[in-house]
Amino acid sequence: MDRLLAQQVAYYRAVAAEYHEHALDGAEDSARELHEALDAFAPRGDVLELACGPGAWTPKLLEHAGSVTAVDAAPEMLALARRRVGDDERVRFVEADLFAWRPDRLYDVVFFGFWLSHVPPERFEAFWRVVAEALRPRGRVFFADDGLRTDDELVEGETSSVIERRLNDGTAHRIVKVPLRPGELEADLRALGWDVAVKPTSGPFFWGAGSLTTPAG
C-alpha cells in the first residue's frame, strides 16, 4: 500500500505539466452544479483544503472564506496553485503527504475536491478521523468527486481499487481510484458518525456536505 500511494504521488507530480489536458469532456453542466452547491454551502471562516492540486477550487473557496490552508503532496501542483491564486495573503500552502499529515490548528470547514476516490478503502476511516481532528466544534465538511474508471484503466479488474493511468508520453502509473457511489458513501459516513448528505449531479460528479453527528463541544 505504501508503494502504491508513493506511485500515486509520483503520478500527480508528473502529470502537473499536462493536467488540464486530461480533463473530462462533456461535464461542464455537472461541474457548474458543483460550483452552485458549494456557493449554497458557503464555506465561510477558516477553510482547510485537502489535496488542492493545481488550485482549481482555491479561488472559489476564497469567494467565501476568510483564510484557506491548502495542502498537497506534489510540489509541482502547489506551484500551479500558487500561480493561480497569486499573492493573496489569505492562503497558506502546505506540502505534505495527507496520509501522514496532521492538522496544526482547527478550521470551520474542511474541503476536498476529487480526492476522496483516491483514498484506499483501508485508509478511509483513518482519513475521516483526520478530517474530524481538523474541525472546530460544529465545523462542516464539503467534498466533490466522481467514481468514474475507464475500461482501459482497470488493469486489475473491476473489483480492484487500483487503476493505471498514462501520461501523454505513455508512462504508466498505478494509482487508487475507488468507484464511489453516493448512496453507499452516505451510509459509510453515517456508520463513522457523520451526518453528510451526498448528492449526485445531472452528470458524472457528486458532492457531499455535512458535519459530525455529535460535534465535540
Image (spheres, grey):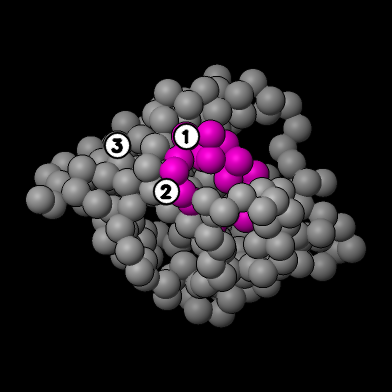
State which mark lies toward you, 1 or 3: 1
> Circle 1 is placed at which residue position?
64
Q: What amino acid does circle 2 point to?
A: Val
Q: Nearer the viewer, residue 169 or 14?
A: 14
Query: To which residue does mark 2 refer?
Result: 47
Q: Position of residue 174 (x, y in %)?
A: 65, 66
Q: Earlier in the sequence, mark 3 or mark 2?
A: 2
Q: Secondary structure at mark 3?
A: strand
**Nearer the observer, 87 or 59:** 87
In the rendered image, residue 62, in percent from the top left (x then y), is placed at 53, 40
Mark 1–mark 3 distance (CA, rounded to whole Å):
17 Å
Point out the stretch of residues depicted in magenta.
51-68
Residue 127, horizontal then vertical, whole percent: 36, 61
Residue lying farthest right?
169
Residue for badge 3: 210
Q: Earlier in the sequence, mark 1 or mark 2?
A: 2
Mark 2 crowd level (few <14, some 14–19, many ≥20, 10 Å Cα):
many
